[in-house]
Image: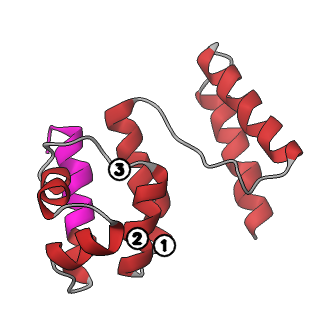
Amino acid sequence: MGNKRTEYGAFLRELRVKNQATLVETAKAAGFTINYMSMVERGKKSPLSAKQARAVLEFLGEGDSYDELMRLASLNRKAVEFDLTKQGAAATDMFLALARASEDGGIDEAMASKIMKTINRSKE
C-alpha cells in the first residue's frame, strides 16, 4: 500500500475486524461518527490523535498495538504525539530533549539504535 493513510487505516480496520467489532460499535465507543471512523479506515482522513487511538484500542482490547498504530500515524504526519500529562518532570524533560535533538538533526541512525537498545534492556 503506497498511501500512508491507507496503511494506517487498514491496520486499524484489521484490528477491528479481528476483534469482531462493527464500525458502528467502534465509532460509538470512541465517540466518533460512523462516517468519520470509516473515512479514517479508508485513508480519507488523517490518523487519530494519540488520545483517540487509545480509546479505540482500549475498546478493541488491543492496547499492545498502540506503538505500531502510532508508528503508522507518524509516517503520515511526520510527527509523533506524546501524552505527557502522566509523566514526571524528569521523563517530560527527557522526551522534550529527544524531540529537540531530533529536530536539530542530532540523532542519527546509530544514536537512535543505541537509545532503543538501552530502552529495550530496561524492559527485560
Q: Circle 1 sits on which residue?
A: 63
Q: Quadrant of the C terminus?
A: bottom right
Mark closer to the chain start, 3 or 2: 3
The answer, for residue 15, to whether it is visible in the render is: yes
What is the number of the mark on residue 57?
2
The answer, for residue 107, to whether it is visible in the render is: no
Whether residues under marks 3 and 2 lie with C-beta atoms below 8 angstroms apart, the answer is no
Say what amino acid the circle numbered 2 marks. Leu
Mark 3 crowdedness (10 Å alpha carbons): few <14, some 14-19, many ≥20:
some
**Looking at the image, is 77 positioned above or below residue 1?**
above
Q: Circle 3 sits on which residue?
A: 48
Mark closer to the chain start, 1 or 3: 3
**Looking at the image, is 36 positioned above or below residue 27?**
above
Secondary structure mostly seen in magenta is: helix
The residue shown at (20%, 66%) is: 13
Whether residues under marks 1 and 3 lie with C-beta atoms below 8 angstroms apart, the answer is no
Residue 6 magenta-highlighted: yes
Secondary element type, mark 1:
helix
- Pick whichever, 63 or 83, lies toward us: 83
Q: Quadrant of the N terminus?
A: top left
| Magenta extent | 1-13
Secondary element type, mark 2:
helix
The residue shown at (72%, 40%) is: 114
